[in-house]
Image (cartoon, grey):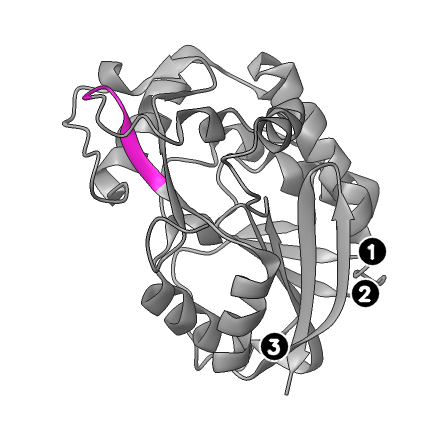
Amino acid sequence: MKLSKEGIPFWQGDWQKIKFEELGIDLDPKKLPSSNFYNAFYLKLKSNYSNFNDLEDEWKVNKKNSIKPLSYFINNGDRILSYGYGIGYMEYLLSSSNNQISIDCFDFSDESNFMLKKQKNVQNIQFLNVLNANSSLKYDVIYLCQVMYALKIEDSITLLNKLRNLLTKNGKLIIIHTPCVNLFSIINLKSILKFNFPFLKNIYSGIDKNLQFWGYSRTDSDYIDLAKKSHLNLVSKIYESGQSFLCFSKS
């Protein structure tokens, strides 16, 4: 059951033990986070933590569990784009596990990658400040890990069109997300929380002034339909550790 045409809305009040009310900016329970929000959050994160070891263990375990299914879609020699990489822990793990690939990283915030840049043993990662949809540089794999929930449907289609143009002829685009379930079922809700996605605990708490509207929970079918509008066809799907890995190719 959806509470809006966009998906099931949810809210968040903290992340990595940082309370959003401490960021010094106004939180908005009705609008998605702005670039100012993300920049303020990552500056706070930078002041509190210095490296990956400082981050929450459960969160790191979840990222580690994401590497194996993602790796199913990756071959040696692939050029990869991680869109919306955030802190970059997953990219660090992926790079460390395979030095035969190259990874370009693009994110909404210029402040997010301070931990990843400290990793001196990572040689196959580059950071992009601008992503040009008409670039001659093409990617064998483009993935978005827990990114799409933060976009409205119209913006999602626009982004997928842009990323489609950056794929090689046989390139793959992978959406990694937490598929929504019937959140009115206590059994299902417990199942979600078991996989350590605490942002879903605030599904009905948007009226709290200390919470930020965080995005929309959607089904696999929702994203498959969105991808079709961008001329991307589903070729494979993996469900593991509470996440769906949807692999698309050009139609």
Along the line of sight, the residue nearer the viewer: 115 or 232: 232
The residue carrying pointer 2 sits among few (fewer than 14), some (14 to 19) or many (20 or more) residues within 10 Å by Cα, namely few
* Residue 217 to residue 209: above or below: below
- Three-letter amino acid code of the residue under disc 2: Gly
Specify the amino acid type for callout 3.
Answer: Leu
Q: Amino acid at mark 1?
A: Gln
Disc 3 from disc 2: Cα separation = 15 Å
From the image, tell me which residue sits under label 2.
77
- Residue lying farthest to the left in this orientation: 26
**Residue 93 can be seen in this image:** yes
Secondary structure category for the residue under label 1: loop
Dot 3 falls on a residue whose secondary structure is: strand
**Do the CB atoms of the residues marked 2 and 1 lie less than 8 Å apart?**
yes
Q: Is residue 134 above or below residue 234?
A: below
Instruction: Look at the picture and state if 179 lies above or below 86.
Output: below
Q: Which residues are magenta?
A: 209-214
Check residue 213 for magenta coloring: yes
Q: Are marks 3 and 1 in contact (CB under 8 Å)?
A: no
Foreground label between 3 and 2: 3
Does the magenta portion include 183? Answer: no
Rendering quarter of residue 26: top left
The span from disc 2 to disc 1 (Cα, nearest Å) is: 5 Å
Q: Residue 185 location, x and y as percent?
A: 56, 33
**First reached walking from the N terminus: tag 3 or tag 2:** 2
Q: Disc 1 marks which residue?
A: 100
Residue bearing mark 3? 167
User: Looking at the image, which residue is at 37% across and 64% down?
Assistant: 153
For label 3, count other residues whose C-alpha is less than 10 Å away and answer few (under 14), some (14-19) or many (20+): many
